[in-house]
Image (tube, helix red, strand yellow):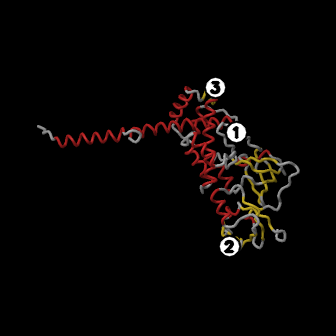
Amino acid sequence: MISYNPVSALLIFLGICILLFLLFWPEKGWYWKMKNNLKDNEKTVIEDVLKQLYHSEIAGNKMDINGLTALLKFKNDQIVEVVKQMTINELIISDKGFLKLTNQGKEYAVRIVRVHRLWEKYLAEKTGFEKTEWHDQAEKMEHKLSFEETNKLAIALGNPIFDPHGDPIPTKKGVIAKLNGDPLPTLKINSIGIITHIEDEPEVIYKQIIAKNIHIGSQIRVIENNTKNIVFYAEGEEFALAPIVAANITVELQNNQVTLEKNKFRLSGLLENETAKIIGISKESRGENRRRLLDLGFVKGADISIDLLSPLNNPKAYLIKGTSIALRNSQASHILIQKNQNHA
């Protein structure tokens, strides 16, 4: 016969009460956390579907459910269920097997794009994150910021029109500025223009572009254009890209009266025994990195020369205002100079 122990019974009862409390504690309990996580995950899938359809439509491409499942990093059955619900909620419609945004869906998608591009602008201007990290960081934040928080961020950044890649940032009313320019492979030889946009997707192509230190805002002249190579000159250097890579660069042509700025170089191209004067810092240098260069004395009008060379010429020490400062070539490429004519 099992004896009744009131102390044990009380402890069991208290244990059950504590367990139930931990499970169902409003907002902080395990049950509510799991429920909210499921809602957040569903929201992320919905917004990623909307954004993918938006970019596809802007590019003039059609998208079906197979295309979505191939592009999005979610389980196929989850995407299918979300698409069904989005159709019911009139965010998308199916037309002959292809998915299209409704007006309501497009408005929602534009809001997501706005958050993403504003956050990339924030990362570029206000933090020390590398440009290869901007996209992934913005992918996370685009699902978290509310409409009000997004507007506050825009105001804090000065309501920018373009993100650091040159993509237009939608206004809070959904107005999108026109991106001027043409894809680099479409330009004729000897065309002169300004790089206005560098597409950051797909990542594998974007990394090839930034590895060559190609900058937004650089004036270029096309030297060669064929099915194998696109070659152009910019700021004292030549760059060669495969056409598929060059297609991610947009260039705004300048009129026939504009000539190439021949005595405009990157500091990374300064040779030993040459002297130069700093004429500015590339738009590619932003945020903390730009402030650091200015604080170190790399300001417009300053005289500069090479002080010391490392065995591999990277980094180099530059003499500026009586101080020797070492910079990697990737950093020096952001500083624009005019070489003194007696050395150029």
Of discs 1 and 2, which sits in the foreground? 1
Residue closer to the observer: 7 or 76: 7
Sooner in the amino-acid sequence: mark 1 or mark 2: 1
Q: Give the image location of residue 110, x and y in percent.
A: 63, 37
Of discs 3 and 2, which sits in the foreground? 2
The residue to which callout 3 is attached is 95
Q: Give the image location of residue 333, x and y in percent.
A: 71, 61
Q: Residues within 10 Å of mark 1 (few under 14, many from 20)?
A: some
Q: CA distance from mark 3 to mark 2?
A: 65 Å
Examine the rendered structure and indicate whether residue 277 appears above or below residue 113. below
Disc 2 is placed on an element classified as strand
Left or right: residue 42 versus residue 323 is: left
Q: Are marks 3 and 2 in contact (CB under 8 Å)?
A: no
Sooner in the amino-acid sequence: mark 3 or mark 1: 3
Disc 3 is placed on an element classified as strand
Q: What's under tag 2, amino acid-wise?
A: Ser
Left or right: residue 15 versus residue 241 is: left
Q: Are marks 3 and 1 in contact (CB under 8 Å)?
A: no
| Quadrant (top left/top right/bottom left/bottom right) for the N terminus | top left
Q: Quadrant of residue 325?
A: bottom right
The residue to which callout 2 is attached is 324
The residue to which callout 1 is attached is 176
Q: CA distance from mark 3 to mark 1?
A: 26 Å
Q: Are marks 1 and 2 in contact (CB under 8 Å)?
A: no
Q: Residue at x 79, y 53 (%)?
A: 220
Sooner in the amino-acid sequence: mark 3 or mark 2: 3
Disc 1 is placed on an element classified as loop
Q: Quadrant of residue 239?
A: bottom right
